Amino acid sequence: MKFEDLLEKAGNLPCFTTRFLAAGANLAQVRLQLNRWVKNGRLIRLNRGLYTLSEPYRKVKPEPLAIANSLKLPSYVSLQSALSWYGLIPEFTPAVTSVTTARPQIIETPIGRYEYRHISKDLFRGYQQSELSEKQVAFIALPEKALLDLVYFTAGGDRIEFLEELRLQNLEKLNKGVLENFAEKSKKFKLQRAVSNIEKIIERGEGIEL
């Protein structure tokens, strides 16, 4: 495969896999050529079998949240990253945080850090495909599920003191009915207690607008 052929096939993709490029070709030879292009700086290896074009050659800038989905399957963006994306917390999140039914993992890539928390299959719900930019989408937790996922993974996350420390803002984006539904279906008393405290914060209007 020539580099021009790769650009024609994958130039508009934020990232691509070895097997995608090797369709109808010799997989071993494609892997060898990809390694050469990584060494000469034309490609960036994100993880085993997953690549993106280096900046001089790419036509689209890869969105971190879309990359997060591709690095580990199945997964969806949640926790602080989703809350930040919705504007529910003021903090910038240096790592992209996701949940997965696979093993927990931290993946360091040349374009960022990606953290994955393991969640049981019965709680792997409450996400949707969201448009990030032209031709790029990602599976992202609904705002209510992102908040409850953070509560679930945090010791004492149901305490009102913890929830107040998040400095939640734009609280109109949270739907009380959706929060209650997720908590009830989870059958987790911790999440039900958290929803009660979240509703107190909403009612008191303690979200901080920046």
Image: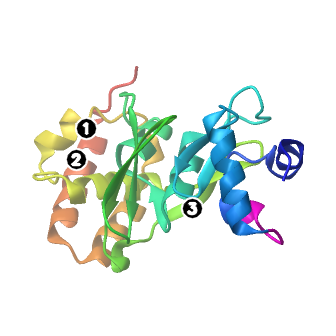
Residue drawn at x 11%, y 40% as measured from the top left: 161
Is 62 or 109 nearer to us in this picture? 109
Do the residues under discs 2 and 3 have CB atoms within 8 angstroms?
no
- The amino acid type, in three-letter code, at marker 2 is Lys
- Callout 3 secondary element: strand
Density class for disc 3 (Cα within 10 Å; few <14, some 14-19, many ≥20) is some
Is 149 or 31 nearer to us in this picture? 31
Does residue 24 belong to the magenta stretch? yes
Residue 158 found in image quarter: bottom left
Density class for disc 2 (Cα within 10 Å; few <14, some 14-19, many ≥20) is few
Residue 188, given in percent of the width and then of the height, sits at 20, 72
| In the displayed structure image, the side of residue 24 where residue 115 appears, left or right | left
In the picture of the structure, the residue carrying the numbered disc 2 is: 200
Density class for disc 1 (Cα within 10 Å; few <14, some 14-19, many ≥20) is few
Between the residue at mark 3 and the residue at mark 1, the CA separation in whole angstroms equals 29 Å
Residue drawn at x 31%, y 43% as measured from the top left: 202
Above or below, comparing residue 97 to residue 88 in the picture: below
Query: Can residue 17 be seen at all in this image of the molecule?
Result: no
| In the displayed structure image, the side of residue 5 where residue 84 appears, left or right | left
In the picture of the structure, the residue carrying the numbered disc 3 is: 128
In the picture of the structure, the residue carrying the numbered disc 1 is: 204
| In the displayed structure image, the side of residue 155 where residue 90 appears, left or right | right
